[in-house]
């Protein structure tokens, strides 16, 4: 049985449905992230688990016990707040010991456990300071220690790292993983930052518009995104519009403008039938760019291949990213090893049919079907 | 005697403006903004004169400080320090202004059991009033901040009574509380016995509570608005129930506002004579009424002045004590360790 079980969780604020029928589980000892853009309802889910909001409908059980309706101070769950919410009138040690004091732990044991926590977050000797005297990273550690000291079943994080600069954020990500392993605690982490989520989590819950888009491991989400939204949100993606022309057991025929291509059945998500409008997605790193001389490959129908002009390039160390205005599908981006192309060069662009993901479009044509970001 | 906190405020304000003047003009954003606004408002001809003046003042820092800090200090000296000094001088004279020097006014007051009883009584009433006003006012401010979206409207309603004169509001209470008044009529109508509250201690408490409530709600409101709601959630998250959270987070975080409210209510109550006179009748004497009597009826100004001085000292001592308690009450710094 999983540690946290969320079923049919729904939260309505007046006419607005912030969280819509959300189901997911968190296993004991896992590091799970809820990832979604601003306003996707991810913080509301977290606040319902913590007990600060009551769900309109749905169940939340912790260790097989239903916790909806019980107040936050009775839940075996502690939270690291977005702006940390350290008590400014208490010292660092008092902040960390606050939870122990509330549960009636005697003073000497409190002191000992607080000291152990300070050591764990590498803040030995900081106990007598007040939070206002600490740097941003140090305050993060205090907030983390305060949430861990009660040894809760589950620790919740409401984007606490978003205020840190990149370097410090990456460092704290590592610290989070180390501390999670050391304390053997379950973490549920909410963020809009896919970089953080991919770096730290065992599994991800992708939320958009209050509804779950996909639940899975980082690899699953990246390699087999369940929808165009997930493909776009987890990493970059190019999108080409098309139409289904044939459906067979092994492959599907697609008209992607100026000729048909055939993609493996496994690349498509959900049932498709002839004449359905689809989005064909491909990651920039799977796009090949060749110089225009390779005349033979260019313009070949029956494959994802076209010609175009390089419009932008950005050097990114090992890779270069090119923005290419293609003749067939508008603007695409490509990430390749070679830095041999310049702006205004004519090039051939191609990728393998096996690398694409095809998603049915729900009637409404997408406004930015001419390419990836 | 009610002047003491204002003196403190004035002093702070004056030194603040002194600081602004001392920091090189135009360096701070605020100064730049103000200058820009002034420039925009004046005709181009006077612009030159303005900069002449600024240059003139810049070369004479002492004169500049004086010209900014001088007026408020002048007002304080003229209308507060000099009268207080005059009171002090008079309190050592016999019977009338210009009488022989004596300590007898103080001796008489401090050895008279009657007067000291009145002081003690006044103290008790002030404590009661302060406790009631702080309790009710804090609850009111708390519910305005935490549970309502119409904050501005509710605050407006709280301070609305200030639009009506104090005396008129007291007479309204006489009307409500007197035997056969509004309150008794309603009680009789629903079959309950009449209370005849007017001219009792209860009437005085009601009157004071009503009058001082807005004065306490405003500082409470200000400090509660500044309280981060996340802190309360953090406390509950860490296992503290509502009462523990209130005592260990909400109250300590708003203690400065609470102390300000206590001072604002306690001091004017201690010196008040109108409310007890109108609502408390003749047997509910407070020390403010005794002082008023010495000046208005007994014409023994020196004795009234002596009582005033003693009460002022007592109140200032209480104020200092309260300031220590609250830590950094009038912006004296956050050294409340």
Image: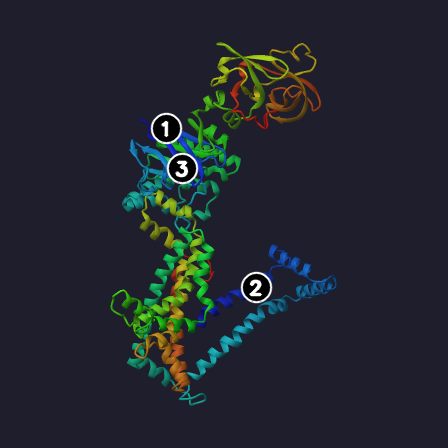
The residue under label 2 is B17
Considering the numbered disc 1 on the image, is that residue within a helix, a strand or a loop? strand
Whether callout 3 and callout 2 share a subunit is answered no
Whether callout 1 and callout 3 share a subunit is answered yes
Q: Residue A33's x, y, as percent?
A: 43, 31
Work out how far the residue at label 3 is from the one at label 2, CA to CA, in angstroms. Answer: 52 Å
Q: Could you say which quadrant of the image residue A152 lies in? A: top left
Chain letter behind tag 1? A
The residue under label 1 is A25
Contact, mark 3 vs mark 2 (Cβ under 8 Å): no
Work out how far the residue at label 2 is from the one at label 1, CA to CA, in angstroms. Answer: 61 Å
Answer whether residue B162 is visible to the viewer in this image: yes
Query: In the current view of this chain or complex, which residue is farthest to the front?
Result: B189
Classify A5 as above or below B116: above
Question: Which mark lies nearer to you, 3 or 2?
Answer: 3
Chain letter behind tag 3? A
Q: Residue B15's x, y, as percent?
A: 54, 65
Q: Could you say which quadrant of the image residue A186 lies in? A: top left
Q: Residue A153's x, y, as percent?
A: 33, 34
Q: Which mark is residue A11?
A: 3
Considering the numbered disc 3 on the image, is that residue within a helix, a strand or a loop? strand
Q: Is residue B42 left or right of residue A121?
A: right
Contact, mark 2 vs mark 1 (Cβ under 8 Å): no
Q: Residue A307's x, y, as percent?
A: 67, 17
Q: Nearer the viewer, residue A95 or B247?
A: B247
């Amino acid at each position: 049985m999983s540690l946290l079980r969320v079923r049919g969780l729904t939260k309505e604020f007046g006419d607005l449905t912030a969280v819509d029928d959300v189901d997911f589980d968190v296993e004991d000892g896992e590091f799970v992230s809820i990832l979604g853009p601003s306003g996707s309802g991810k913080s509301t889910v977290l606040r319902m688990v913590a007990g600060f909001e009551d769900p309109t409908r749905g169940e939340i059980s912790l260790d097989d016990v239903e916790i909806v309706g019980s107040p936050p101070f009775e839940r075996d769950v502690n939270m690291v707040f977005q702006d940390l919410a350290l008590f400014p009138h208490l010292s660092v040690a008092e902040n960390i010991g606050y939870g122990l004091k509330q549960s009636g732990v005697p003073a000497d044991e409190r002191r000992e456990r607080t000291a152990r926590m300070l050591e764990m977050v590498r803040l030995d000797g900081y106990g007598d300071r007040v939070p206002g005297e600490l740097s941003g990273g140090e305050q993060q550690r205090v907030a983390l220690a305060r949430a861990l000291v009660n040894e809760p079943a589950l620790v919740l994080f409401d984007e606490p790292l978003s205020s840190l600069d990149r370097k410090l954020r990456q460092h704290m990500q590592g610290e989070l993983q180390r501390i999670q392993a050391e304390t053997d605690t379950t973490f549920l982490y909410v963020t809009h930052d896919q970089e953080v989520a991919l770096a730290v989590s065992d599994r991800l819950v992708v939320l958009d518009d209050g509804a779950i888009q996909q639940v899975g491991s980082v690899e699953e989400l990246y390699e087999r995104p369940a929808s165009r939204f997930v493909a776009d949100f987890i990493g970059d993606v190019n999108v080409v519009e098309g139409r289904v022309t044939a459906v067979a057991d092994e492959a599907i025929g697609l008209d992607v403008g100026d000729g048909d291509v055939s993609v493996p059945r496994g690349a498509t998500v959900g049932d498709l039938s002839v004449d359905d409008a689809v989005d064909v997605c491909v990651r920039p790193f799977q796009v090949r760019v060749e110089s225009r001389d390779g005349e033979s490959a260019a313009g070949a129908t029956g494959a994802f291949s076209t010609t175009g002009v390089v419009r932008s390039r950005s050097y990114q160390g090992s890779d270069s990213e090119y923005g290419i205005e293609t003749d067939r599908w508008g603007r695409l981006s490509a990430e390749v090893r070679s830095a041999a192309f310049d702006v205004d060069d004519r090039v051939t662009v191609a990728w393998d049919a096996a690398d694409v993901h095809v998603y049915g479009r729900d009637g409404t044509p997408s406004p930015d079907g001419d390419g990836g970001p | 005697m009610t002047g003491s906190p204002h003196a403190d405020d004035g002093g702070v304000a004056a030194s603040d403006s002194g600081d602004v003047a001392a920091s090189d003009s135009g360096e701070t954003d605020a100064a730049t903004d103000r200058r820009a606004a002034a420039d925009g408002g004046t005709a181009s001809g006077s612009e030159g004169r303005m900069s002449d003046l600024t240059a003139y003042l810049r070369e004479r820092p002492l004169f500049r400080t004086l010209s900014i800090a001088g007026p408020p200090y002048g007002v304080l000296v003229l209308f507060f320090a000099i009268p207080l000094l005059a009171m002090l001088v008079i309190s050592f004279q016999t019977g009338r202004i210009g009488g022989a020097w004596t300590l007898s006014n103080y001796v008489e007051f401090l050895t008279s059991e009657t007067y000291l009883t009145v002081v003690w009584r006044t103290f008790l009433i002030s404590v009661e009033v302060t406790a009631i006003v702080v309790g009710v006012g804090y609850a009111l401010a708390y519910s305005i901040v935490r549970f309502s979206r119409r904050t501005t409207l509710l605050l407006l309603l709280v301070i609305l009574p200030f639009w009506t004169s104090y005396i008129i509001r007291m007479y309204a209470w006489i009307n409500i509380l007197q035997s056969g008044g509004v309150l008794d009529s309603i009680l009789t109508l629903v079959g309950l016995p009449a209370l005849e509250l007017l001219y009792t201690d209860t009437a005085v408490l009601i009157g004071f509570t009503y009058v001082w409530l807005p004065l306490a709600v405003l500082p409470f409101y200000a400090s509660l608005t500044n309280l981060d709601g996340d802190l309360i959630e953090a406390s509950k998250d860490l296992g503290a129930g509502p009462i523990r959270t209130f005592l260990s987070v909400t109250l300590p975080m708003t203690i400065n506002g609470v102390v300000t409210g206590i001072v604002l209510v306690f001091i004017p109550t201690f010196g008040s004579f109108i409310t007890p006179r109108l609502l408390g009748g003749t047997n509910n004497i407070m020390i403010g009424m005794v002082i008023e009597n010495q000046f208005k009826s007994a014409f023994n100004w020196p004795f009234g002045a002596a009582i005033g001085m003693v009460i002022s000292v007592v109140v200032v001592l209480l104020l200092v004590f309260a300031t220590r308690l609250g830590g950094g009450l009038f912006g004296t710094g956050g050294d409340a360790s």
